């Protein structure tokens, strides 16, 4: 029996360094960042880590031996005019097989939209939530009425 293939994340040296109380890869301290870059410099999966960070546009941290500022430039160069969040095709979405939302509304072309994070959302649920919020706002008294005005 062969051992299962390990991903680049399993082989990354940073997994041995980071603890709940110490994460130099996401620190603002210059010494911590230098420590993180030193770990990256000898890491066997540095290239795969950098590729992942660029393709997923990681906004924070040290990835693939690159400081955050340099990583942001590489991401911008890779994106080269493409939108920040490419729309996800419905057939590729992990919930594409679902035909209804949690509340039972049908996912069809008129009732479905994708938010900025790529999650499929139900327009009927959004509309209902907006109406609930609006009704709650109308029931609350205005602050000017509560305070008694300036001459009180």
Image: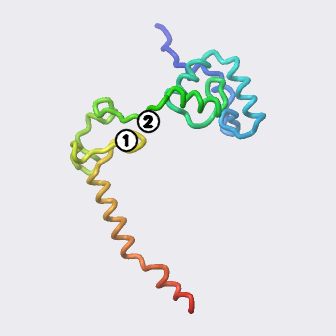
Q: Give residue 114's position: percent from left, percent from top.
A: 34, 42
**Disc 1 and disc 2 in contact, CB within 8 angstroms:** no
Q: CA distance from mark 1 to mark 2?
A: 17 Å
Image position of 80 with respect to 150: above or below: above
Left or right: residue 110 versus residue 16 is left
Q: Choose top left, top right, bottom left or bottom right for residue 41.
A: top right
Which residue extends farthest front? 81
Label 2, on which residue? 83
Image position of 116 with respect to 75: above or below: below
Q: Earlier in the sequence, mark 1 or mark 2?
A: 2
Question: In this figure, what is the number of numbered marks?
Answer: 2
Going 48% across and 14% down the picture, which residue do you hit?
Answer: 4
Q: Choose top left, top right, bottom left or bottom right for residue 45.
A: top right
**Relative depth, front residue between 39 and 15:** 39
Tell me the element at label 1.
Answer: loop
Going 67% across and 34% down the picture, which residue do you hit?
Answer: 19
Label 1, on which residue? 119
Q: Choose top left, top right, bottom left or bottom right for residue 63.
A: top right
Q: Give residue 125's position: percent from left, percent from top.
A: 29, 54
Left or right: residue 71 versus residue 128 is right
Mark 1 neighbour density, 10 Å: few (under 14) some (14–19) many (20 or more): few
Tell me the element at label 2.
Answer: loop
Q: Quadrant of the C terminus?
A: bottom right
**Relative depth, front residue between 151 and 90:** 151
């Amino acid at each position: 029996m062969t051992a299962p293939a390990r991903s680049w994340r399993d082989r990354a040296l940073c997994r041995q360094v980071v603890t709940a109380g110490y994460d130099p890869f996401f620190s603002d301290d210059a010494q911590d960042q230098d420590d993180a870059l030193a770990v990256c410099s000898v890491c066997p999966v540095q290239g795969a880590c950098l590729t992942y960070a660029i393709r997923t546009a990681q906004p924070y941290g040290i990835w693939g031996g690159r400081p955050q500022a340099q990583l942001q430039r590489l991401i911008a160069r890779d994106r080269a005019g493409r939108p920040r969040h490419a729309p996800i095709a419905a057939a590729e979405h992990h919930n594409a097989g679902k035909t209804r939302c949690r509340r039972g509304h049908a996912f069809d072309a008129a009732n479905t939209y994708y938010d900025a994070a790529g999650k499929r959302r139900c327009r009927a649920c959004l509309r209902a939530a907006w109406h609930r919020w609006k009704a709650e706002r109308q029931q609350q008294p205005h602050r000017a009425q509560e305070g008694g005005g300036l001459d009180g």
